[in-house]
């Protein structure tokens, strides 16, 4: 499943199925060659974070530092990722 937040607080889900058209996904987001990953976590204007259990989080590079600051503001065992995303996107 893909989960996408826009800067206008629109929240989208996309479930991966055997009929999923990867070409449409690439057109809407980014090509495989452009996608940051473990060996290159910042690439083509996007930043990558592995979140375990096959979940990955991508954020535009210009929002990345503001997002990371949220982790330094308090010590928490569980990070409310969506809450931080909303705070960053609302600026």
Image: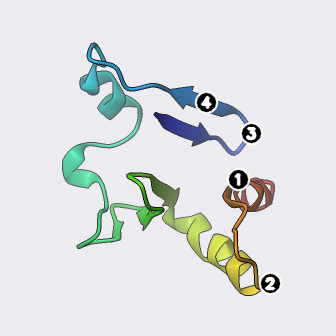
Q: Residue furthest left?
A: 33
Q: From what the image shows, is residue 50 above or below residue 70?
A: above
Label 2 to label 4: alpha-carbon separation: 28 Å
Label 2 to label 1: alpha-carbon separation: 16 Å
Image coordinates of residue 39 in percent, x first then y, are 23, 73
Residue in the foreground of this view, choosing between 63 and 4: 4
Please tell me how crowded label 3 is: few (under 14), some (14-19), or many (20+) other residues with Cα within 10 Å: few
Q: Nearer the viewer's eye, disc 4 or disc 3?
A: 4
Label 3 to label 1: alpha-carbon separation: 14 Å
Image coordinates of residue 44 in percent, x first then y, are 33, 61
SS under mark 3: loop
Mark 3 or 1, nearer chain start: 3
Q: Residue at x 80, y 60 (%)?
A: 87
Label 3 to label 2: alpha-carbon separation: 26 Å
Label 4 to label 3: alpha-carbon separation: 12 Å
Which disc number belongs to residue 66? none
Q: From what the image shows, is residue 20 above or below residue 30?
A: above
- For the image, the number of numbered tags is 4
Q: Nearer the viewer's eye, disc 3 or disc 1?
A: 1
Please tell me how crowded label 1 is: few (under 14), some (14-19), or many (20+) other residues with Cα within 10 Å: few
Q: Residue at x 80, y 54 (%)?
A: 90
Mark 2 or 4, nearer chain start: 4
Residue indicated by mark 3:
8
Which disc number belongs to residue 74? 2
Q: Nearer the viewer's eye, disc 2 or disc 4?
A: 2
Quadrant (top left, top right, bottom left, bottom right) of the C terminus: bottom right
Label 1 to label 4: alpha-carbon separation: 13 Å
Which disc number belongs to residue 82? 1
SS under mark 2: loop
SS under mark 4: strand
């Amino acid at each position: 499943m893909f989960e996408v937040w826009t800067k206008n607080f629109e929240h989208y889900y996309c479930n991966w199925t055997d009929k999923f058209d990867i070409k449409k996904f690439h057109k809407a987001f980014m090509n495989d060659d452009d996608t940051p990953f473990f060996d290159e976590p910042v690439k083509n204007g996007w930043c990558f974070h592995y979140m375990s259990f096959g979940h990955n989080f991508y954020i535009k590079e210009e929002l990345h530092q503001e997002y990371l600051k949220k982790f330094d503001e308090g010590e928490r065992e569980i990070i409310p990722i969506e809450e931080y995303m909303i705070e960053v996107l609302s600026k």
